[in-house]
Image (cartoon, helix red, strand yellow):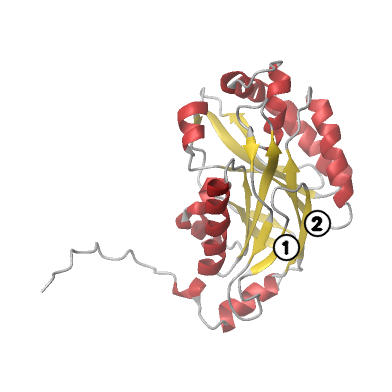
Amino acid sequence: MTPAPLRLGLLQYRVERHASVAAWADWLDGWLAEAAGRADLLVLPEYACVSLGAGLARTDVADEAAELRAMLAAHAEVLAAMRDAAVRHRTWLLPGSLPWPRGDGVAINRAPLITPEGRVAFQDKMQMTRFERERWGISRGADPRVFDTPWGRIGVSICYDVEFPKHVRAQVEAGAWAILAPSCTDTMHGFNRVHYAARARALENQCYVAICPTVGDAPWSAALDANRGFAGVFGPIDRGFPEDGVLARGALDTPGWVFCTLDPARIERVRREGAVLNHRDWPRRPLAQPLPADFG
């Protein structure tokens, strides 16, 4: 039986300074209240809560190491605030991602998916950007997972991960018909890598892919100093979908919600009756190693 459509809300999240987890939680509560009744699942960007880092570190000067230490120390309190928000608003919530101490001295980038009852499951980021690896010391997390929801299986591919076809493909082959890609990018180059990668993943897998960025400038934060982008939802470029595959998008660099209803029946139909069948025709065996061509 095909699951019911999913009403999705994506927050173009304005980065603001907060002095405490409680203050950030109040601010988050206001945004979630604004979306009440308009969506079943609400999504925030990658590292959204890291806007807290400078306030928790009690520094007026951007300091990468101090902000990361503060976020790692507060990770349990931040997650509790996220869970409380989901329960209070009775919504499914992907509140972005947060730096997470793995327990062996390693920090990873972890995204929680929270049910309206407060149950939590996680997707880690696998591929690190240069900032994460070289300057922040964030390490690769666990392999791709999928989440069973009332709307069927969905996947989460955090920012840079959506630029790698095999990450999303693993989730799709495990049954995901929609992929959520929260992101945090400081240039239009970075945003467009995520943007166009998401559209490519939607095309080649005949699935939905939704992106959700941080926006605004925060000179007081080393991690979130500049933020560019817009939220968007993309589908297959085929029958039953827009000619460019764009189902919804927000205004560039403008805070606010973007809403879109995702119907899994449309995905089933295009995978069965599309002009092309990218999902079915994904190569099942690795291609042979290409050989140099001979010029006559």
Residue 151 has which mark? 1
Question: Foreground residue, 63 or 25?
Answer: 63
Give me the C-alpha separation between circle 2 and circle 1.
10 Å
Q: Residue at x 88, y 52 (%)?
A: 36
Query: 10 Å neighbourhood of mark 1: few (<14), some, or many (≥20)?
Result: some
> Looking at the image, is 123 positioned above or below residue 1?
above
Q: Under tag 1, what secondary structure?
A: loop
Relative placement, left or right, of 182 versus 29 is: left
Marker disc for residue 103: none
Q: What label does residue 40 carry, if any?
A: 2
Give how far across and how far down residue 106 sits, in percent: 51, 26
Q: Are marks 2 and 1 in contact (CB under 8 Å)?
A: yes
Which amino acid, mark 2? Answer: Asp
**In what element is the residue under mark 2?**
loop
Question: Where's residue 55, x and y in %?
Answer: 73, 21
**Residue in the picture at 79% in, 42% down:** 118
